[in-house]
Every structure is written in C-alpha cells, then in structure tokens.
C-alpha cells in the first residue's frame, strides 16, 4: 500500500500528467482509438458474416438445382448418370468442396472424394434433414461451410424426402479476402489515428487558450501591473470563475482600502493626544516662572490627553480581540435582566451628571447563553452613547423582550439623532458623526465597532434607526442559545 502511495505521489508531482490540456488530449485520443478499433473489427466481422451467408446461399441454390436433376435422372437408384456425376464434380471443384449423396437408407451412394461411398452415415444433421430441414453450419476450426439439403419427391399430394445432399464448401477464399481487407483496414486506421492525433493537439490547445489568457491576466494582477477586471466569455464555466475572481478582487480592494484608512485613522488618533501633550509641555518649558495655577491647568490637560490615549489603545486592543474567532467567547447562562440592572447601576452617576434619566423596561424574565463580559461592554457602549449624545433633561430607555428563540433589546434615546448618510457608517472604526462634539466628550469612534463585532460573534444582528433632532434607536437581536 505504501509502495502504491509513493507511486501516486510521484505521479502527482509530474505537472504534465495533472494538466487539463494533457487529459483532454488523452480523452480525444482514447475516443479516436476506440472508434478505429470498433470500426475495424465491426467491418471485418460484418464482411465475414456477409461473405459466408452469400457463399451459403449460392451453394444452396446450386444444390437445390442438383437435387431436381437427381430426381429427374433417378440418380438414387442408378448413380451412373454421366450428366449428374459431371455436375457433382463441377460443383465440388468450383467451391473447392465435397459432395455426398445419401439415400433413405442412410447409405452414401456418391462421394466426390471417393472415400465414403457405400458407407452408412447417421448424424443429427442428416436425421433432421430427412425430416425436411435444410441445415448450414460454419466450422471455424477447418474453415468449411457444411450444408445438408433434402432431396424431395412429390407423390400425389404428399412430399417425401427420399435422400440427402451433404456438402462441405471451403471458406479459405473468404478468409484470404478478409486478411487482405484487414491489412487495408489497419492502414486506414493508422491514417485516421494520425488525423485524430492532429485534431487532439489542435482541440486541446484551442480549448485551453481562454484558460491561459485568464491565467496570464491573473498573474498580471498578482504582479501589480493592472487592477482592471478580467474579461472571459468563451465558456460559461470560465465566465463564472472569472466573475468570482473579479468579485474577490473587488472585495480585497475594499478590504485594502479599509485597512489603509484604518491605519491612517489609528495613526491620526494616536498622534493627536501626543501632539497636544508635546504642545502643552513645550509651553511650560519655554516659559519662565510659570504660575502654579497655569502649571496645574496644563498638567491637568496633559493627564486628560494621556487618559484619552490610553482609552484609544484599550479600545483598539478590545477590537483586535473581537476580530479573532468566536472560540474566545466564554459562553455561560446569564440572567439578562440582572445584567441590565448592573449596567444601569454603573452608568447612573454619568447619567445624573448629564441630567439624563435612565429607564429600563422588561416584558419578561430573560436567560440566555452569552459571554457576559463582552455583551456587557456592548450594551454599555450603546447606553453611554445615548447619554453622551443627548440633550439636556433627556432620557435613555432600554426595552427587553424575548420569544422562544431570540431575545431583543432596544436602546432608545431622546438625543440629537443621526442623519441618514451617517447611519450607514456609524459602525465603521473611528467614524464619528460630530467630530468636535466627540472630542469634547472623549469619544474614540471605536465603541460602535466594538459593539457590532460583539453582536456578530454571538450570531446576532444590530440595526439603527434615527432622525436628526428626534433621537436614535439601536435594536439588537441575539439567540437565547449560542449557535456554534
């Protein structure tokens, strides 16, 4: 088994054997060879069978005529007729065969070979012939056609069999002609195989040209010489492959653009607090006898910028962890009502500071299989946004409900709202609707991206609906049982 496995492994390494062009060539050649063989043997067999049938029919006609002459000349009683004997010898010589005349006593009265005269012959063929059957067989061992024809005479209204003509005819001439025809058929087959070979080479090359064109185009894209779409409409299957590749390239371009934008945003976001810290520190260094009040103010600003830098880094680390596979989830059965109440308790000081009322409404008790830490972070982000981007004396309400498969919670606020264009991008990393307001409240533009990643890891969905000046509603739908 290991030996066969090694052979298969070595064959797989041979590129030619794995080539579709080579396999197509082999298929065409195999079909061509098979057709030539079928044609050759079919023609040979058909010719031979036809030649034997024709020879048998000719001899039987001659024998039937001879049988009439035997009755006419009363040959069965008097086998001395020179006319009949001449006909028998002529028939024997013409077909290179042997003729035996057998009377109703199964006695041979005439043998053109003068070997069996006077002998008694009892065989199945002779007995059946006396019953009125004409029989013919081909002996492929000796190349002879054997025939038995009854000699009949009409007495009154009854036909009687009074003798049998047993004839053996040589088929050597048929075999010789068959051999000559076979040699000609082999020559024709060779010529046809040459034609099939040329066709196989041409067709395999022609069929594979579109694939070569696509391969070259893909290599050009891979080398960076072009970013245009690949076009190939020669075959439906190839068109599907090209369409899939073009879609993949478009997706990769989007991902590449997103990566570049992400790197640019990260660089900008990380650089901004550092720039502020440097400006504040330089201001302190360039001034002499800095008042304590100004010194404290600048140092407080530096601490704020450092805190902002730290928050950006922490959010980035959270996002990187969420980008990994869901195997990192710590799934457990969690009381969602208690989780919401705990989150509300933590956010209550922030809401009071902003003058925002927090409202929690639950239609029923909900228990689900989730990662409590990650889901808590996602819910916190949504409620924090509702608090921070709200108006004075506003409110944030969370409504919790469930059915037999999913639980849903909506985070509704009375805040400033989001326009339709911005709603399409709010889950993108570093995207902020109001950048100036975001900087005032310390937003990094990563909170909703983290929330969306968490929801998707739990095999859920998140939607947003909003109108500028009328508030925003985030709807999150998650399965009660975690789906692997």
Image (cartoon, rainbow, N blue to C red):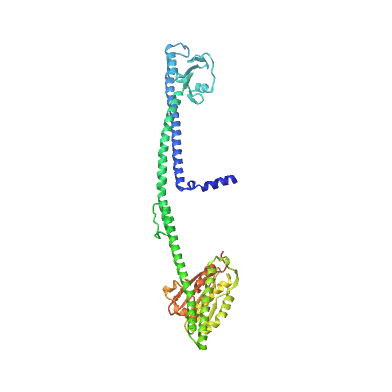
Q: Is residue 140 above or below residue 223?
A: above
Q: Assign the N terminus to one quadrant of the image.
A: top right
Of 73 and 179, nearer the camera is 179
Q: Position of residue 52 (x, y in %)?
A: 45, 26
Of 264 and 363, nearer the camera is 264
| Residue 155 visible in the picture | no
Q: Position of residue 401 (x, y in %)?
A: 54, 73
Corner quadrant of residue 195: top left
Q: Is residue 11 above or below residue 175?
A: below
Q: Position of residue 321 (x, y in %)?
A: 55, 69
Q: Looking at the image, which residue is at 44% across and 36% down?
A: 36
Q: Position of residue 346 (x, y in %)?
A: 57, 80
Q: Assign the C terminus to one quadrant of the image.
A: bottom right
| Residue 339 visible in the picture | yes
Of 319 and 334, nearer the camera is 319
Q: Is residue 122 above or below residue 344?
A: above
Of 421 and 336, nearer the camera is 421
Q: Looking at the image, which residue is at 44% across and 79% down?
A: 436
Q: Looking at the image, which residue is at 46% across and 11% down?
A: 80
């Amino acid at each position: 088994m290991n030996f066969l496995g090694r052979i298969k492994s070595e064959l797989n390494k041979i590129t030619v054997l794995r080539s579709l062009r080579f396999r197509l060539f082999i298929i065409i050649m195999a079909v061509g060879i098979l057709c030539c063989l079928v044609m050759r043997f079919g023609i040979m067999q058909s010719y031979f069978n036809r030649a034997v049938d024709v020879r048998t029919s000719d001899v039987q006609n001659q024998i039937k005529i001879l049988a009439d002459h035997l009755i006419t000349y009363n040959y069965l009683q008097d086998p001395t007729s020179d006319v009949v004997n001449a006909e028998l010898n002529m028939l024997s010589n013409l077909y290179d065969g042997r003729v035996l005349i057998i009377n109703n006593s199964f006695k041979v009265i005439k043998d053109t070979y003068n070997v069996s005269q006077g002998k008694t012959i009892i065989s199945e063929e002779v007995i059946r012939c006396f019953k009125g059957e004409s029989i013919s067989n081909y002996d492929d061992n000796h190349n002879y056609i054997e025939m038995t024809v009854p000699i009949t005479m009409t007495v009154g209204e009854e036909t009687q069999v009074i003798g049998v003509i047993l004839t053996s005819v040589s088929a050597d001439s048929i075999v010789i002609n068959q051999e000559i025809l076979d040699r000609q058929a082999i020559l024709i087959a060779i010529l046809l195989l040459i034609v099939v070979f040329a066709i196989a080479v041409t067709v395999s090359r022609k069929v594979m040209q579109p694939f070569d064109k696509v391969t070259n185009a893909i290599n050009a894209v891979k080398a960076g010489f072009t970013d245009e779409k690949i076009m190939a409409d020669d075959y439906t299957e190839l068109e599907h492959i090209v369409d899939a590749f073009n879609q993949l390239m478009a997706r990769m371009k989007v991902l590449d653009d997103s990566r570049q934008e992400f790197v640019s945003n990260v660089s900008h976001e990380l650089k901004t607090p550092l720039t502020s810290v440097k400006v504040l520190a330089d201001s302190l260094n360039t001034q002499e006898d800095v008042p304590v009040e100004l010194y404290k103010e600048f140092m407080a600003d530096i601490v704020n910028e450092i805190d902002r830098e730290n928050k950006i880094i922490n959010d980035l680390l959270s996002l990187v962890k969420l980008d990994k596979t869901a195997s990192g989830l710590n799934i457990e059965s969690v009381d969602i009502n208690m989780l919401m109440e705990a989150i509300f308790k933590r956010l209550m000081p922030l809401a009071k500071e902003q003058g925002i009322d927090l409202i929690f409404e639950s239609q029923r008790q909900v228990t689900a299989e989730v990662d409590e830490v990650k889901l808590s972070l996602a819910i916190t982000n949504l409620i924090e946004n509702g608090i921070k981007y709200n108006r004075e004396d506003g409110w944030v309400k969370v409504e919790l409900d469930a059915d037999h498969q999913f639980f849903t919670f909506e985070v509704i606020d009375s805040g400033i709202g989001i326009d339709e264009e911005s709603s399409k991008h709010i889950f993108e990393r570093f995207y902020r609707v109001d950048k100036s307001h975001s900087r005032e409240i310390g937003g990094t533009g990563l909170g909703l991206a983290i929330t969306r990643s968490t929801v998707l890891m739990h095999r859920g969905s998140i939607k947003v609906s909003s109108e500028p000046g009328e508030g925003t509603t985030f709807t999150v739908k998650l399965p009660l049982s975690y789906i692997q």
